[in-house]
């Protein structure tokens, strides 16, 4: 029997992490001929993930430019991916999440009538501008899809409400949990040299921030809060793996560069980041994926945003939406650091696992099999 060619498109770090288990599951199944198409929306941050998971792109379009605009990413992905699809003979294309790679690659597949599977479909914040431009990307791509792989029941419900036929929707769990479980078994102590300055057993907070809508004043508000947290707690360290984006690094460097107990470092490779999440007292982040991972490892996360498309995290109790203003972030962090039992109470609430049990990629492959091989 002829194997079905499935092209998995990835562009950025989180797409690579969350698509890796799907690529591996497809590769392990003799019914499929899996190809990885990287747009190269990210460069080093994408390679770092592919290296760890032992994957390589069959083709990388290497589109990344410094301080790239949304117009540039959209048009270069649309054209480059479209040209790739023209010669690929794909039976299906898989895209992940809500980046501009996701939307533009989906559009290129749609223009050619290639069926699209959307991994992590159906997330909605309810505000088209938050996060920006991710909410628009995910809404638009879900208008083009044949398979919506919803990570949770709520995400499936969102797809239903928007008119996606019932037969197109499946609840799979989030593939980030598959990636996380795989990673936890691989490495238990960190390799990154930067982390060696952290004294053994020192309490630390893990911080990430990169969202486009936070560039400028909101990110400054976040940084002001971080400085005050460090000042208020002379025993506490901060590990801040900085996104490669210069707009983000400049602001973080301005506020936290050279401060005692603030470790500003390059993006950590995935196992080191997982180690840092697990070992930290708690996390402050505006990342989507980190909210899901924090919930799975029962770690409190202060969500540095005004809205989340992952309300399951807030309902479960591991995540607190603290926004981007200094006062609220500071108050929430000091409460966790100073109120006896505050962290333990959150950890206790996290018995439920809203994002699945680590079998999302197998479920996705099974659905594709039923659909493409019947
Ligand atoms: C992108 C996604 C966002 C996702 C994030 C994950 C869009 C519009 N945004 O945002 O949804 O949450 O990835 O991290 O799709 N850079 C490097 N090296 C790298 C990666 C980035 O130098 O390996 C720098 C470049 O200057 C680049 C800039 O970061 O222009 C921004 O990258 P871009 O992909 O446009 O935006 P992100 O903020 O990374
Ligand atoms: N991550 C990582 N190293 C880092 C920071 C984050 O491996 O230094 C991982 C993290 O565990 C999560 C993913 O990157 O799986 C989140 O990526 P990001 O925050 O860039 O994007 P988002 O999830 O917000 O789209």
Image (spheres, rainbow, N blue to C red):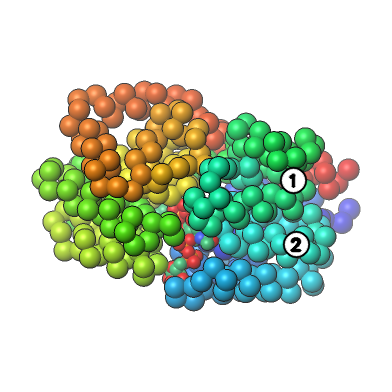
Decide: is 30 above or below 267. Answer: above
Residue 300: x and y, percent? 35, 35
User: What residue did someone put label 2 on?
Assistant: 109
Element type where label 2 sits in the image:
helix
Mark 1 nearby-residue class (10 Å; few <14, some 14–19, many ≥20):
many
Decide: is 43 above or below 161. Answer: below
Residue 362: x and y, percent? 67, 41
| Image quadrant where residue 277 sits | top left
Residue 28: x and y, percent? 69, 49
Decide: is 199 above or below 319. Answer: below
Decide: is 220 above or below 323. Answer: below
Mark 2 nearby-residue class (10 Å; few <14, some 14–19, many ≥20):
many
Q: Residue drawn 67% across and 63% down?
A: 105
Front-lying residue, 118 or 311: 311
**Residue 120 appears left or right of 113:** left
Element type where label 1 sits in the image:
strand
Q: Which mark is residue 147?
A: 1
**Residue 306 appears left or right of 360:** left
* Residue 205 shows up from this direction: no
């Amino acid at each position: 029997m002829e194997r079905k060619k499935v092209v998995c498109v990835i562009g950025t770090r989180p797409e690579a992490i969350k698509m890796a288990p799907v690529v591996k599951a497809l590769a392990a199944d003799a019914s499929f001929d899996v190809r990885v198409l990287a747009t190269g929306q990210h460069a080093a941050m994408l390679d770092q993930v592919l290296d760890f998971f032992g994957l390589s792109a069959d083709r990388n379009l290497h589109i990344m430019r410094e301080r790239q605009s949304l117009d540039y990413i959209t048009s270069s992905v649309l054209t480059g991916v479209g040209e790739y699809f023209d010669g690929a003979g794909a039976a299906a294309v898989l895209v992940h999440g809500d980046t501009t790679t996701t939307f533009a690659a989906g559009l290129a597949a749609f223009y050619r009538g290639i069926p699209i599977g959307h991994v992590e479909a159906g997330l909605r914040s309810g505000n088209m501008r938050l996060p920006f431009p991710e909410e628009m990307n995910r809404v638009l791509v879900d208008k083009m899809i044949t398979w919506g792989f919803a990570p949770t029941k709520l995400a499936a419900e969102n797809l239903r409400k928007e008119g996606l036929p019932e037969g197109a929707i499946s609840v799979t769990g989030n593939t980030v949990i598959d990636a996380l479980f795989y990673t936890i078994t691989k490495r238990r102590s960190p390799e990154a040299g930067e982390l060696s300055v952290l004294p053994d057993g020192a309490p630390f907070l893990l911080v990430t921030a990169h969202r486009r809508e936070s560039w400028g004043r909101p990110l400054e508000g976040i940084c002001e809060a971080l400085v005050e947290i460090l000042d208020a707690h002379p025993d506490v360290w901060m590990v801040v793996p900085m996104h490669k984006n210069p707009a983000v690094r400049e602001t973080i460097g301005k506020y936290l560069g050279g401060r005692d107990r603030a470790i500003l470092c390059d993006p950590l490779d995935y196992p080191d980041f997982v180690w840092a999440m697990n070992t930290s007292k708690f996390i402050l982040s505006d990342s989507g994926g980190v909210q899901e991972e924090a919930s799975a490892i029962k770690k409190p996360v202060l969500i540095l945003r005004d809205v989340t498309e992952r309300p399951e995290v807030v309902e479960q109790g591991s995540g607190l939406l603290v926004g981007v203003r200094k006062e609220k972030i500071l108050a929430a962090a000091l409460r966790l650091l100073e109120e006896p039992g505050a962290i333990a109470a959150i950890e206790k609430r996290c018995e439920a696992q809203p994002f699945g049990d680590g079998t999302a990629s197998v479920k996705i492959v099974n659905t594709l099999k039923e659909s493409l091989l019947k």
